[in-house]
């Protein structure tokens, strides 16, 4: 029986979501479109299997092929990132981070991570997150002038605060992160160093952003952002920490691993070793730079003045609009972005001063600099006419026209 016959209601909603993805310009920096083969593997039979434990050491029988799947994923992750040890079981980015903390820290220990407004993530010890309840989160900011990381200031703060762990990595930082500088800071104060490369993992894998792996005690990531794999997580560490990390993931935090997703991660890591993946990541960066130029040409202020990676932060408040208003107006024309805080933001997180724009998803659809620049022009047009229905209607038409040239999952249908 087809899904459509079995559950027309659900099939209909899945179809609507597929159409939404096809008919919008996706500029959310943390999103991407996985290859159809990844979709296929995510829906494969390992979902039926309990495999608590690790390859060769399972609590249930019948895991000979599951072990092969997980070993493939582990070996490929190690090869891709040059890591000594990989744990492929974390369910997503936040669970990976929590496991990394649980491996190294005791409740109450201090974590020094990047502030939310500077581009950090909730899971880096922020008070609304469990990571800020079990651990004491302290935040470093970027430099108020340059809006880039100030390693001397972070060193000073680390010496003052004496954190047990320093976390580097961000969700909204458009520049290169100097992991070696973080390592020197961590060594100076005797702290563990963790890098969370959730956003930039694809760039790191492609060699377009320096790798934290040589410098960090532990590196966590999601696999579904620039890495273009299934929605999931990954932890890598030095061999000396392998047991601690594995015990933290299971049995401390998780039960049965999602082996169908681990299988999809194995495929994701293989694809990320291909030359085409490098070319893709290089295009992601080129597209971000092309968009940045358009905004600058129109007099917009970009946080840090530009971008070195897959994202940019546009200060829309400087043009007299709120981040939420900008996000909503763009959604009306079929362009999805997210409102985002900017460093030292004076507005509230629910309606901050910026929008974050990323190029991984449009690049997966095949767009090059010309299309990226055209989209940036459309964004500007909407931002300058947030209340003008006729302008928005015209832009919506142009968005639909543009997208027709870049089909998404052409053979796929749920209803
Ligand atoms: C996206 C992100 C996460 C969280 O990942 P989830 O899969 O949403 O749990 C963690 N850290 C950083 C830096 C991120 O950007």
Image (spheres, rainbow, N blue to C red):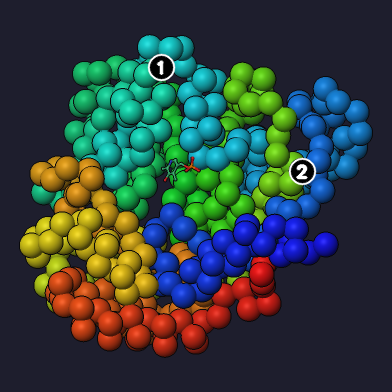
Residue beneath disc 1: 134
Q: Residues within 10 Å of mark 1 (few under 14, many from 20)?
A: some
| Residue 82 percent location from the top left of the image | 61, 45
- Kindly tell me whether residue 346 is visible in this rendering: yes
| Residue 372 percent location from the top left of the image | 36, 77
Asked which secondary structure carries label 2, the reply is helix
Which residue lies at the image location 26% right of the left edge and 74% below the top edge? 379
Q: Nearer the viewer, residue 386 or 250?
A: 386
Residue beneath disc 2: 47
Q: Quadrant of ligand 1?
A: top left
Which residue lies at the image location 38% right of the left edge and 12% below the top edge? 108
Relative to residue 287, is residue 48 drawn left or right? right
Name the image quarter holding the N terminus.
Answer: bottom right
- Kindly tell me whether residue 373 is visible in this rendering: no
Residue 35, labelled with which disc? none
Which residue lies at the image location 85% right of the left edge and 29% below the top edge? 56
Asked which secondary structure carries label 1, the reply is helix
| Residue 205 percent location from the top left of the image | 55, 55
Q: Quadrant of residue 381?
A: bottom left
| N-term mark: 2 or 1 | 2
Which residue lies at the image location 46% right of the left edge and 65% below the top edge? 360
| Residue 152 percent location from the top left of the image | 21, 35
Name the image quarter holding the C terminus.
Answer: bottom right
Q: Nearer the viewer, residue 251 or 169?
A: 251
Q: Nearer the viewer, residue 172 or 13?
A: 13
Q: Is residue 241 above or below residue 97?
A: above
Q: Quadrant of residue 396?
A: bottom left
């Amino acid at each position: 029986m087809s899904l459509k016959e079995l559950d027309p209601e659900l099939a209909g909603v899945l179809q609507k979501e597929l159409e939404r993805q096809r008919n919008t310009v996706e500029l959310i920096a943390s999103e991407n479109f996985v290859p159809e083969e990844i979709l296929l593997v995510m829906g494969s039979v390992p979902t039926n299997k309990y495999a608590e434990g690790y390859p060769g050491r399972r609590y249930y029988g019948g895991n000979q092929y599951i072990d092969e799947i997980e070993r493939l994923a582990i070996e490929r992750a190690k090869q891709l990132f040059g890591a000594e040890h990989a744990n492929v079981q974390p369910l997503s980015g936040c669970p990976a981070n929590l496991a990394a903390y649980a491996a190294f820290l005791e409740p109450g220990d201090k974590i020094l991570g990047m502030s939310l407004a500077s581009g950090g993530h909730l899971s880096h010890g922020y008070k609304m997150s469990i990571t800020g309840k079990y651990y004491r989160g302290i935040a470093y900011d970027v430099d108020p002038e340059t809006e880039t990381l100030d390693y001397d200031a972070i060193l000073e703060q680390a010496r003052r605060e004496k954190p047990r762990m320093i976390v580097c990595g961000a969700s909204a930082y458009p520049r290169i992160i100097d992991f070696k500088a973080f390592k020197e800071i961590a060594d100076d104060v005797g702290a563990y160093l963790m890098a969370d490369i959730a956003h930039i993992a694809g760039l790191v894998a492609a060699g377009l952003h320096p790798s934290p792996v040589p410098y960090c005690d532990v590196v966590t990531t999601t696999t579904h952002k620039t890495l273009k794999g299934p929605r999931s997580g990954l932890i890598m560490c030095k061999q000396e920490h392998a047991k601690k990390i594995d015990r933290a993931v299971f049995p401390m935090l998780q039960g049965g691993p999602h082996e169908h997703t681990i299988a999809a991660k194995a495929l994701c890591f293989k694809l990320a070793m291909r030359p085409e993946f490098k070319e893709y990541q290089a295009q992601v960066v080129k597209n971000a730079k092309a968009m940045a130029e358009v905004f600058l040409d129109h007099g917009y202020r970009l946080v840090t003045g530009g971008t070195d990676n897959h994202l940019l932060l546009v200060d829309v408040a400087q043009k007299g609009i709120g981040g939420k208003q900008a996000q909503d107006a763009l959604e009306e024309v079929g362009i999805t972005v997210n409102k985002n805080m900017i460093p030292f933001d004076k507005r509230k997180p629910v309606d901050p001063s910026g929008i974050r724009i990323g190029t991984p998803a449009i690049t997966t659809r095949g767009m090059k600099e010309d299309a990226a620049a055209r989209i940036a022009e459309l964004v500007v047009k909407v931002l300058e006419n947030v209340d003008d229905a006729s302008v928005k209607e015209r832009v919506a038409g142009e968005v639909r026209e543009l997208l027709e040239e870049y089909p998404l999952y052409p053979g796929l249908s749920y209803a």
